[in-house]
Amino acid sequence: MHINQTSRCLAGFATLDALAALMVLNLLCLAVLAGQWQALQSQRDALAMQTAVALAQDLWERMQINPQATLAYQLQLGQTVPAVDCQTRACSLDNWAQADLAAWLGTVKLRLPGAQVQLLTNNQAQVQLLLAWPVNDLLLNSAGAVIAECPAQHRCWQTRWTL
């Protein structure tokens, strides 16, 4: 009878050991998943930054073609630009700039959904561009400098150039 009680007691310890091993395995799986999630977020951020740089280069090229209308290239965060049709009718340089800006803003909305743009220019042909796109990760400003004009729940990229 003494042997049966010992084997029952050992069977209980084996079950506890198995549960402890399962807990450790679950924690390891959670750590791997967290690492994968962070890698995915980093990849999304890198793609968005690359897209922002490409969009800024596109805008710079558009503005190089029409430098006389530099002051017509203005946008505030969240502002939309009415589409101007300069393909079928004659347009002033400012109208061309507005048509260009509307087309570029359409590209921004397509490539960075939910993005907002701030574009400031001055008489010295200096341009400041801020692109802000929504993010849903918990570490919004974990990398890079914080930009004061960046809206809440957005990641921002800012650049300046002179025409």
Image (spheres, helix red, strand yellow):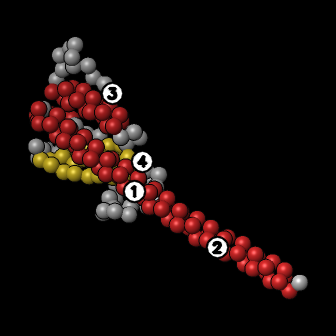
Q: Mark on residue 39? A: 1
| Left or right: 153 in relation to 11 | left
User: Dot 1: what SS?
Assistant: helix
**Which residue is depicted at the point 17% across and 34% down?**
62
Question: In the image shown, does 77 or 62 lie closer to the viewer?
Answer: 62
Q: Earlier in the sequence, mark 2 or mark 1?
A: 2
**Amino acid found under the numbered disc labelled 1:** Ala
Q: Determine the CA span between mark 4 and mark 2.
A: 41 Å
Q: Earlier in the sequence, mark 4 or mark 3?
A: 3
Q: Are marks 4 and 1 in contact (CB under 8 Å)?
A: no
In this rendering, does residue 118 appear at all? no
**Which residue is depicted at the point 23% across and 46% down?**
53
Q: Mark on residue 82? A: 3
Residue that mark 2 sits on = 20
Label 4 or label 3, whichever lies nearer to me, is 4
Q: Earlier in the sequence, mark 4 or mark 2?
A: 2
Q: Earlier in the sequence, mark 4 or mark 1?
A: 1
Question: Crowding near pointer 2: few (<14 within 10 Å), some, many (20+)?
Answer: few
**Which residue is depicted at the point 29% across and 40% down?**
75
Question: Crowding near pointer 1: few (<14 within 10 Å), some, many (20+)?
Answer: few
Residue 43 sits above or below residue 64 on the image: below
| Left or right: 93 in relation to 42 | left
User: Dot 2: what SS?
Assistant: helix
**Amino acid found under the numbered disc labelled 2:** Ala
Label 2 or label 1, whichever lies nearer to me, is 2
Q: Determine the CA span between mark 4 and mark 3.
A: 23 Å
Q: Determine the CA span between mark 2 and mark 1.
A: 29 Å
Residue 148 sits above or below residue 99 on the image: below
Label 4 or label 1, whichever lies nearer to me, is 1
Q: Are marks 4 and 2 in contact (CB under 8 Å)?
A: no
**Quarter-of-image position of residue 15:** bottom right
Q: Residue furthest bottom?
A: 2
